[in-house]
Image (cartoon, rainbow, N blue to C red):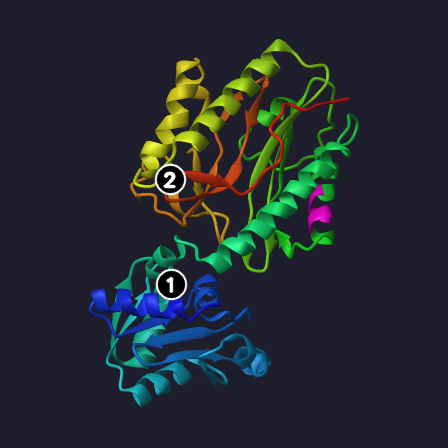
Amino acid sequence: MSNQRVERLRQRLQELDLETLFVTNAVNRRYLSGFTGSAGYLVITMQEALLITDFRYREQAPQQAAGYRVIEHTGNPAVTIAETLRELGIRRIGFEQHDVSYADYQNYVKEFGIEMVPVDQLVEQLRMTKDDEELKLIQEACDLVDRTYEHMLGFIRPGMTERDVALELEFFMRAHGADSPSFDTIVASGVRSSLPHGAASEKVLEPGDFVTLDFGAYMNGYCSDITRTVVLGPLSDRHREIYEIVLEAQLLALERIKPGMTGAEADRIARDYIASRGYGEQFGHGLGHGLGMEVHEQPRLARTGSIVLEPGMVVTIEPGIYIPGFGGVRIEDDAVVTETGLKRLTKSTKELKVLQ
């Protein structure tokens, strides 16, 4: 973790005419400090960076949060934070409005006794653009899901259940370095593959099924997210047609998306192509989303995506077609925005695999 992140935050605080930020969000806490404990608060001023946590992290916190002054609280953390704010002479503080409940806000106002200013997604905006350290960690998570997919091609067969497949996916990732899945693994087969977020069930895989695998690895604080769809033979013309349309839409988006586009403009590339092939009504979700310390971050690549893409942003590209009563296809890769376009981070084959 680089203290450059704290410096970038201070620059943004100056632009907002704020001298101090109170960070309660756990992901933002880790992003800014490197501290991985389950409890703690940050107070960032123009001169100091403080981490307030409890006895459990007395040793861990100073080791991980380089450049931070660690303060141990006992009992109510708001009391210790209030004492620290008075010590620093702080009379006005920004807080993360999307993370603080109304009950907590009332408690902080009571204990702090200073002006609290709501701040909208300030750290999340900084997190949208990844530094070299982050890109390295995301690439490692992407490499693992590529290895996992290759393993699964030799594992999946008719007669096993979707749950069997999901368990093997997760076991392989954990056995090869993942801390956990990035999200609840999706395995949807046959008619259930028309469910974009079909959680793995006890349905048995049968010949003629599409099988959609949507999974990710969470490693060292960062996520990957990949989707591949295979067919359990025999392969029909309809299987091939739908698969090829989704693949062509995805390849078109990967080729044409560039910095300077809004998320809506990026989304339109794949959406217009799928619509031109007669399946516009069967592609109802967005083209993709930001990816990093959380599996769903800004920017959104969707009809309403207004954020302009910039180099260093990592996004998913995941068009799909979903036909109730038959099945569906989604193909997803992770990619980083470069100065000229997109660079794929997941590299698994997208050849239509027919498994017997």
Looking at the image, residue 146 sits to the left or right of residue 101; the answer is right
Q: Secondary structure at mark 2?
A: loop
Residue 124 screen position, x and y as percent: 38, 57
Name which residue lies at 43% across and 13% down. 278
Q: Pointer 2: what residue?
A: 340
Residue lying farthest to the right in this orientation: 159
Residue 313 screen position, x and y as percent: 41, 48
Q: Nearer the viewer, mark 1 or mark 2?
A: 2
Q: Pointer 1: what residue?
A: 101
Q: Which residues are magenta?
A: 169-173
Residue lying farthest to the bottom in this orientation: 87
Name which residue lies at 34% across and 46% down. 310
Magenta segment: does it hold 322? no
Nearer to the camera, 63 or 208: 63
Name which residue lies at 72% across and 14% down. 234
> In the image, what residue type sits under mark 2?
Thr
Q: Secondary structure at mark 1?
A: loop
Q: Is residue 275 above or below residue 305?
A: above
